[in-house]
Amino acid sequence: MNAPAKSSTDSPTSLLFSDLKLRDVEVKNRVVISPMQQYASDQSGEPQRWHLDHLGRLAQGGAGLVFTEVAAVNQDGRNTHFDVGLWSDAQTDNWARLADAINSGGSVAGVQIGHCGRKASIQTPWAGFGPLGPADAARGEAPWQVVGPSPIASNPGWPVPAELTIDQIETLIDEFGQAARRAAQAGFQALNIHGAHGYLIHSFLSPISNQRQDAYGGDRSGRIRFALKVAQAVRANWPGHLPIFFRISAIDGLDGGWEIDDSIALAIELKKAGVDVMDCSSGGLTARTTTAATPRPEGYQVPLAAAVRAGADIKTMAVGLIRRPSYAESVVCENSADLVAIGRESLNNPFWPLHAAVELLGDAGYACWPHRYGWWLERRASQLRLNEASNA
């Protein structure tokens, strides 16, 4: 729906700061914190104190929903040795502490699960962000065999993935389901399946990286089979009253690659499989889009979310260089997306949602703040205005 009409005497209103019901989960506003890898775990794959502080602070910042970084569904599905995972029941207790930290901060606790596929076994960003090699092994970070739908490296000089067998694919599908079960046991209320940025699911979707000729390759119906089976396995293991998000690269942006019409067709089928929200990113099949030097306008991926929303009649989440509250408001008011996700902007300002509420709603926005802060800041704002008026 569009924002309510205003008269000159109306108080400010905001659709961005209206609630939204997703199955039985109600988010207090449409601002979401995107999954952002922290490379802060240990070999256990469990969240550490850093994760509790980092995500607890972002929850206190006022977003309706806060997602964790991607949790690998098996140990080989990690990007680095320092990624988190949900591949064992023994990990659940620490994930429960993390879900509690997010909920206690006032946000709905969401978790993302995935497998990095042919982009696994890499260095941390500050160690080079390339494939692990002998020097890394010498300091205890040995490389491991990466996997994919076809033996095609993601970038020149990167490891060639081992082509997954049908039995291995079926095992992976079950591992996604089991990770979802553990996430539910830990107390998360929303789940995001990572199917973007060149990771395993995306590499099955794109004809550039998937050149199989069996049931999991060939035409589009074959290439989306893995994604659909993963979604079905997750839905079977995830409570029916809780929502599922599915992150996609809506376009590859490469000749002969995945296109927006493919994403719409996929979204239609994922909706049938029980997915509630399409999380629309783009690119990343080969080079990383998050570290690319190409200048991009604010909200450059919003039209992709709008196209999927209209074409598949499904809720979408827009993401990508969304910095200004007024722009975020326009995204939901113009029906381009139902939710707006921010990532690195929240690292710059963990209280971005709360400041956005004041910018869009005026002093009424302080009601969105924790009352221990908002009560004082609303009065401070009034006093500052009086000071400015007396000095005018």
Image: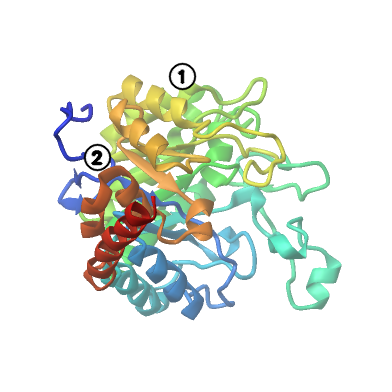
Amino acid on which disc 1 is placed? Asp
**Drawn side of residue 381 relative to residue 143, left or right:** left
Q: Could you say which quadrant of the image residue 284 lies in?
A: top right
Q: Which residue is mark 2?
A: 14
Which residue bears the numbered disc 1? Answer: 261
Cα gap from disc 1 to disc 2, whole angstroms: 32 Å
Kindly state the secondary structure of the residue where label 2 is placed.
loop
Viewport quadrant of the N terminus: top left
Q: Nearer the viewer, residue 380 or 322?
A: 380
Q: Quadrant of residue 79?
A: bottom right
Q: Quadrant of residue 8?
A: top left
Residue at 73% across / 64% down in the picture? 126
Q: Position of residue 153 (x, y in %)?
A: 74, 42
Q: Determine if residue 282 is in view.
A: yes
The amino acid type found where label 2 is placed reads Ser
Q: Which mark is residue 126?
A: none
Nearest to the eye among marks 1 and 2: give it. 2
Q: Please state the horizontal and vertical placement of residue 19, each as a whole percent of the image.
A: 19, 46
Most foreground residue, 132 or 284 = 284
163 lies left or right of 112: right
Image x and y of residue 146, in percent: 67, 54
